[in-house]
Amino acid sequence: MKIGLFFGSFNPIHHGHLIIAQAVLNQTDVDQIWFVVSPQNPHKHSKTLLHEFDRLDLVDRAIADNYHFKSSDIEFHLSKPSYTIHTLTHLSEKFPNDSFRLILGGDNLEQFKSWKNYDKILDYFGLYVYPRGEQKQSDLWQHPQVTRIEAPLLQISATYIRQCIQQGQSIKYLVPDTVEELIQSKKFYI
């Protein structure tokens, strides 16, 4: 099976994330998109970052109706700090019959060469990259293992959603209804 890996804090997951994942699914030959929830960094405690299991629960609720989407807590069980190359290597060993490719925002492509073993990620896994507005043109756009994904550019951010919650404003249409319901019932981000 071919799997696209979408890493993030998903704090909270929102429609922008889901639209990007669907665009990758529509424009590539991947069979599934795995939402890899990044664990809480023990050195960076933030009042706005929900516990990793709460964020995983929000992802599960958001993707429950799409069998092409799956959540993953794989990084919760790996040593810290969590480097993408280690996660990819671990997944390849755990699922030897599957192939993995990283989903990345175009704004992160500029810094990609600073990632640990970025060249190995490119050579052995590859990238699906979606543009995110104005950005510098990286030479990596021309790399044979980089595939450009055309996705609608939505200016939705988890930061904006958290601010709306803290200000008592509605987040309807920004997140799936099931995510909004859990956020409200558990009083997340207040």
Image (cartoon, helix red, strand yellow):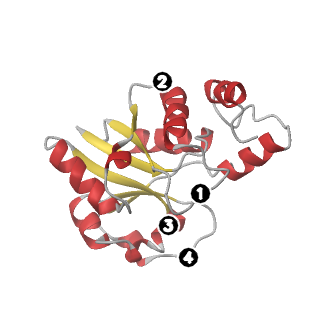
Q: Secondary structure at mark 4?
A: loop
Q: Marks 4 and 2: in contact by CB < 8 Å?
A: no
Label 1 to label 3, Cα distance in Å? 23 Å
Type of the residue with mark 2: Ala
- Circle 3/circle 2 CB separation < 8 Å: no
Image quadrant holding the C terminus, namely top right
Amino acid on which the number 1 mark rests in the picture: His
Q: Is residue 168 left or right of residue 75?
A: right
Instruction: Please say whether residue 157 is visible from this viewpoint.
Output: no
Image coordinates of residue 109 in percent, x first then y, are 46, 69
Look at 45% across and 50% down and name the residue there.
Answer: 39
**What is the three-letter code of the residue carrying label 4?**
Lys
* Callout 3 amino acid: Asn
Q: Is residue 103 above or below residue 94?
A: below
Q: Which mark is residue 64?
A: 2
The earlier-in-sequence mark between 2 and 4 is 2
Task: Give the residue drawn at x 68%, y 36%.
Answer: 188
CA gap, disc 3 to disc 2?
28 Å
State the mark number for residue 108. 3
**What's the CA distance linking mark 2 and mark 4?**
36 Å
SS category of the residue bearing label 1: loop
Quadrant of the snapshot with the N terminus: top left
On the image, numbered disc 4 is attached to which residue?
136
Check disc 1 and report the residue beneath it: 45
How far is the residue under mark 4 from the one under mark 1? Answer: 31 Å
Q: Residue furthest top?
A: 65
